[in-house]
Image (cartoon, grey):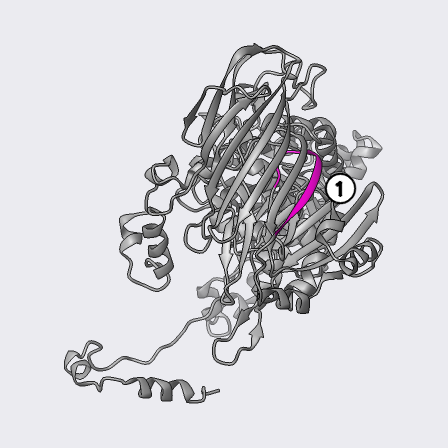
């Protein structure tokens, strides 16, 4: 660090004050330019503030569905009547429906366009990266599975057939008469399809088989659903390829599900006929659960285990109704244990429930419904009261979790030792279950109510929901092992290869979890904690949720609402985090220290003497000291005035000049000369390209430490290099940029002055002697028999 004395002229002080805005780069890249060229022009349906306009509209589709689950054949047969409401100002000549089960057809776009990651990854013969047995089975048997919808009839309200065309996962129904604005139309569809075995033909739903010869059915995307038609896109009929999820219309559902008589059914909506399908004891327990403080067992494990031993040959029909939802899903099994607990707070009055096989215990009985209640409590704080009567978590091996209105399918469960039968679960399984329940139940808010276009923008539901999941996990317990939200968790991805911007269509995303879940969740946390602060952010986020509750927002509506409600220009933030793959990497490049000259020669010459005395003693002077005879020492008569005084001696001329200088100063100018402040010019460079606030931890000579926060606008004149003026009352001994790792800075090694060593450990290994590939020895090795293997397994494990 350079230490300099600053002349105390106002011009000099003004010059230093303006150093924070350094000269423009020759090729100026304005990171703060507005998003006007990227965002759509506001309209009377979507305003410049991000709110729905006075002419906002959206379509509606009501469903009446009757379906039967054929357990033996693993198939569903159904009939639906759809009442479609054209609330748009447009005349429609045809309607589009989603046929998502067609993803499983052998010639589907998803299957025929599938690729491997790379030739190198395919060829790696290691347990970690090579092709697994189950993976190969899936690749082979998926080609043989007879999946997809079989549409047997499409009719109008009078029973006359309607012409339809199936295009992959979409079906167009041609209307004999155009549908005018404000009109509604009813039609029916009959269909059936085979249900995929989730362990072999992977999907978002299917059935799971167990060793006891029973099965668990988790059924979704199971009926032809109306595609969305909306102002910003028209018909959303992009093919379903598996990654981009669903864009749907709200409506009321009346659904009857006929299943084996010994099955328990969990579904979207409220059960309408408990007297037909539940015992008196189960109905009594369900009533008790509504006001219980802990989960109440509606179906006990003993009751579920008794059902596992006998398969009913008769059936029962469960009837559910759901109001103002965008989809319907259900789960059915005789293996289900069922517990429930009511949750009532402010405008929320819901029954939190979990359905799980005995293989889920003890983990599920302890945590699942508790996590559902916790989710409703936390998410409502940051958005709106939960609007539905039930919230359900179902244990199904879906490889994580999957969400639908009021119901979600969640995978983690304990493991059972094949030899001892001991049941246990790891820490990652426990917190994985709590986290996935929070995440999937949380989807009821985004996108089940704030109804974004998932087929187009995965981050608008997954990213926002992952952010709220992070907040809810933080409220579960201290040091919850969160998987996203914290900046330090995303830093390595931010600098990785093969990235695409967050604002990339769902089907074109690479590094899917990091891009659509982790990065937007982290961005929102940075926005909340570092850019806006909690108060401004929380108000704006709640306003977005309130504005777009039961409506369909676009990215522009989110960006504009957050700016409008926070009163902050955030275009630089959206541009950097969402539209680029720039990353944060700020470096402290240099520091110079200045103090203001008092002009008093007594002070200034003493300061200069101290600076010279602080310089290192030359090696020559060190070696001469005490060893080299000096003539002046033996002849003191040679000394004169200059041997008694040096250049730092104060003269009367110095004193007269000082008096003349201060006589013309005003009192405030004299006071400024005696201020004694320490001024530091600190050079920062932006290596990663993503502009960011600076969080500066300053430590002073006395040991005092404090944090100074500098907004991102410091980079507005030059996004690559800036010089910041820091003023302190005493000398600064250290400076750390981003001390709490809150900005996702990808390289912390250049964030400190003085530089800090990076601690690590060096592993030492024994030298390996002899050939590692001894074919002769391997050839002569004794061939193990079954008895030998059994003896090996019986040997105690060394501890």
- Of all residues, the one furthest to the left in this rendering is 776
What number of labels is visible? 1
Q: Residue at x 33, y 80 (%)?
A: 766
Q: Is residue 325 magenta?
A: yes
From the image, tell me which residue sits under label 1.
386
Which residue: 58% across, 60% down?
639
- Estimate the x, y position of residue 12 in percent, counting from the top left: 65, 32
Q: Is residue 696 visible?
A: no
Q: Residues within 10 Å of mark 1 (few under 14, many from 20)?
A: many
- Magenta-tinted stretch: 315-328
Q: Is residue 360 visible?
A: yes
* Residue 277 image offset from top left, x and y in percent: 70, 52
Q: Is residue 605 above or below residue 719?
A: below
Q: Nearer the viewer, residue 672 or 80?
A: 80
Residue 306 image position (x, y, % from top left): 63, 68
Residue 753 in the image, given as x and y percentages of width and height: 57, 53
Left or right, residue 220 beside residue 44: left
Instruction: Give the structural element (helix, strand or loop) at label 1.
Output: loop
The answer to if 593 sits in the magenta stretch is: no
At a point 51% along the width and 62% down the height, the residue shown is 617
């Amino acid at each position: 660090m350079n230490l300099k004395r600053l002349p105390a002229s106002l011009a000099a002080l003004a010059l230093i004050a303006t150093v924070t805005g350094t000269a423009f780069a020759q090729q100026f890249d304005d990171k703060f330019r507005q998003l006007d060229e990227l965002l759509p022009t506001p309209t009377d349906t979507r305003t410049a503030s991000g709110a729905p306009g006075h002419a906002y509209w959206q379509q509606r589709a009501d469903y009446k569905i009757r379906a039967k689950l054929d357990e033996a054949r693993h198939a569903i047969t159904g009939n639906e009547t759809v009442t479609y409401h054209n609330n748009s100002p447009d005349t429609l000549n045809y309607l589009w429906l989603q046929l998502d089960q067609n993803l499983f057809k052998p010639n589907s776009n998803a299957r025929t366009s599938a690729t491997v990651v790379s030739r190198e990854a395919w060829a790696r013969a290691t347990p970690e990266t090579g092709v697994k047995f189950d993976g190969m089975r899936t690749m082979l048997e998926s080609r043989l599975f007879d999946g997809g919808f079989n549409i047997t009839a499409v009719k109008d309200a009078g029973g006359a057939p309607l012409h339809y065309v199936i295009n992959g996962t979409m079906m167009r129904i041609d209307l004999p008469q155009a549908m005018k604005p404000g009109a509604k139309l009813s039609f029916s569809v009959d269909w059936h399809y085979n249900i995929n075995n989730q362990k072999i033909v992977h999907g978002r739903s299917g059935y799971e088989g167990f060793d006891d010869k029973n099965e668990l059915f988790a059924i979704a995307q199971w009926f032809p659903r109306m595609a969305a038609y909306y102002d910003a896109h028209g018909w959303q009929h992009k093919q379903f390829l598996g990654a981009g999820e669903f864009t749907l219309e709200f409506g009321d559902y009346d659904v009857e599900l006929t299943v084996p008589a010994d099955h328990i059914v969990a579904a979207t909506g409220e059960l309408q006929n408990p007297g037909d399908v539940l015992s008196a004891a189960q109905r009594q327990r369900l009533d008790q659960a509504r006001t219980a403080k802990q989960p109440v067992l509606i179906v006990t494990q003993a009751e579920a285990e008794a059902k596992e031993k006998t398969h009913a040959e008769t059936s029962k029909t469960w009837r559910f109704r759901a109001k103002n939802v965008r989809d319907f899903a259900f789960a059915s099994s005789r293996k289900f244990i069922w517990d429930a607990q009511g949750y009532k707070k402010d405008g929320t009055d819901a029954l939190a429930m979990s359905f799980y096989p005995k293989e889920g215990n003890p983990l599920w009985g302890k945590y699942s419904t508790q996590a559902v209640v916790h989710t409703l409590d936390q998410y409502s704080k940051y958005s709106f009261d939960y609007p539905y009567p039930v919230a359900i978590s179902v244990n199904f091996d879906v490889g994580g979790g999957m969400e639908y209105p009021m119901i979600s399918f969640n995978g983690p469960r304990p493991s059972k030792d094949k030899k001892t039968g001991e049941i246990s679960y790891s820490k990652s399984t426990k917190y994985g279950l709590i986290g996935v329940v929070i995440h999937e139940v949380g989807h009821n808010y985004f996108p089940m109510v704030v109804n974004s276009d998932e087929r187009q923008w995965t981050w608008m539901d997954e990213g926002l929901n992952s952010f709220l999941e992070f907040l809810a996990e933080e409220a579960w317990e201290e040091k919850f092992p969160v998987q996203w939200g914290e900046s330090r968790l995303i830093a390595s991805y931010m600098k990785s290869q093969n990235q695409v911007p967050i604002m990339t269509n769902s089907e074109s995303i690479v590094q899917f979890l990091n891009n659509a879940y982790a990065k937007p969740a982290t961005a929102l946390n940075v926005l909340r904690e570092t850019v806006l602060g909690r108060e401004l952010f929380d108000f704006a986020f709640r306003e977005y949720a309130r504005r777009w509750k039961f409506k369909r927002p676009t990215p522009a509506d989110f960006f504009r609402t957050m700016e409008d409600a926070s009163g902050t220009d955030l275009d630089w933030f959206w541009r950097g985090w969402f539209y680029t793959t720039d990353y944060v990497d700020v470096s402290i490049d240099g520091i110079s220290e200045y103090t203001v000259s008092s002009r008093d020669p007594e002070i200034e010459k003493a300061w200069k003497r101290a600076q010279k005395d602080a310089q290192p003693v030359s090696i020559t002077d060190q070696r001469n000291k005490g060893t080299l005879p000096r003539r002046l020492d033996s002849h003191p008569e040679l000394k004169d005035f200059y041997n008694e005084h040096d250049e730092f001696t104060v003269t009367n001329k110095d004193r007269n000049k000082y008096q003349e200088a201060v006589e013309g100063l005003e009192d405030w100018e004299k006071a400024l000369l005696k201020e004694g402040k320490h001024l530091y010019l600190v050079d920062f460079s932006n290596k990663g390209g993503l502009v960011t606030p600076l969080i500066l931890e300053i430590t002073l000579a006395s040991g005092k430490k404090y944090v100074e926060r500098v907004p991102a606008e410091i980079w507005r004149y030059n996004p690559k290099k800036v010089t910041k003026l820091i003023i302190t009352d005493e000398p600064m001994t250290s400076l750390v940029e981003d001390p709490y790792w809150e900005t996702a800075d990808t390289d912390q090694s250049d964030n400190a002055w003085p530089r800090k060593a990076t601690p690590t450990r060096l592993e030492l290994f024994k030298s390996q002697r002899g050939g590692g590939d001894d074919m002769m020895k391997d050839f002569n090795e004794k061939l193990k028999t079954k008895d030998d293997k059994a003896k090996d397994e019986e040997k105690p494990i060394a501890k």
